[in-house]
Amino acid sequence: MTDGIIRAARLFDGTGATARHARAVVIRDGRIADTPALADARRDLPVLAEAHTVTPGLIDLQVNGGGGVLFNDAPDPETLRIIAAAAAREGAAHILPTFITDAGTRYARAIDAVRTARATIPALLGLHLEGPFLSPDRPGIHPAEAIRPPDDADLATLSAAGLPLLVTLAPEICGVQAIHRLTKAGIRVFAGHTEARGTDMIRAEAAGLAGVTHLFNAMSQITPREPGTVGATFAARRLRAGIIADGVHVHPANLELALRILGPERLFLVSDAMAPLGSDIRTFDLLGKTIHRRDGRLTDAAGTLAGADLGMAQAVRRMDRLTGCGLARAVQMATETPARVMGLQHELGGLRPGMRASLTLFDEGMRPTGVLVDGVPAGA
């Protein structure tokens, strides 16, 4: 681990504040020591890197694959290493690898893989299980035959996982007792792939529901006499929501609406990336379905979206371009807000002294040029 300075023409601190210019980030023992003006920076420390723009390390809480591989295909530490490296090439310093609906209790292999890999891959924050406890009426690309409610054995397995977990489930299928039990075990529970009514969401939030997964997609919508999952999220006071800002999954007007209602403190960016992340592959297999990569979309033969052709740096750029929110708020939605979702706001997502020196470096076009995790280049 090397002490030194990152020189930045422009610095976003993750809070949504306007950029500061001509700054340095001083790193000591893998932590941020200071962010002084360049003119005031110590001269006796080596310059580790220079960049046009520096932000806290981008955080992706929903990434299914990358580098040509999918976590579901091979839930093991080597797959996780490949995915983390691919995510870093696209700007993400930290990720929640995501294991989607699969047969039976195969998700237990994902738990074991992440538990083992976290010892050597500091980019891993834990695990996101998206299914199998979803609504059969809202499967999306998930294999409908594997969707089911949780039983006592599932809840016991999840509660004893021994690592940070985010679990996406359908509240109306799983019930408030299951949500309460998972939340009590320290698991972050999100609603997704759900037909939940407004009353279901209110009860689920009271039981500990923390947010919703890929807002607007695979969930009940607002109608004149029923708020659905989307409306209930807007009406709630504390629910956070991940959103895919690729311009495909969510119309720009709805991106802007969600940001206006939830603010960057509650709305955060996710990639929902699949195997093509950080690679040039054009097709891949997803649990028996051939998925095609065309024109910024990932779809099966029927045209069903299968995750997103998106990286986190690209999500930041597109959120700014599609909504006019400004880079400061787009960066906040990719740094501080997802850190808060995971209870890591004192460690990640910002540039305060004492925080982990996880940083993303960009060129003038906000394309990533490097990622540091705990002061070390990603993959080193």
Image: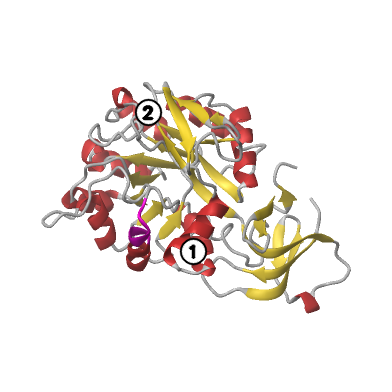
Q: Mark 1 belongs to which amino acid?
A: Asp
Residue 357 seen anywhere in this rendered image of the structure: yes
Residues in magenta, as a range: 250-255
Q: Quadrant of the C terminus?
A: top right
- Seen from this angle, which residue lies furthest right? 44
Look at mark 2 in the image and give the residue it sits on. 301
- Seen from this angle, which residue lies furthest front? 295
Q: Mark 2 belongs to which amino acid?
A: Ala
Look at mark 1 in the image and give the residue it sits on. 320
Say few, some or many: other residues with alpha carbon within 10 Å of mark 2 (under 14 / 14 to 19 / 20 or more). Answer: few
Q: Secondary structure at mark 2?
A: loop
Instruction: Locate residue 337, reporting x and y percent.
Output: 47, 59
Nearest the eye: 8 or 106: 8
Residue 334 seen anywhere in this rendered image of the structure: no
Distance of mark 1 from mark 2, alpha carbons? Answer: 31 Å
Look at discs 1 and 2 and give the one toward the viewer: 2
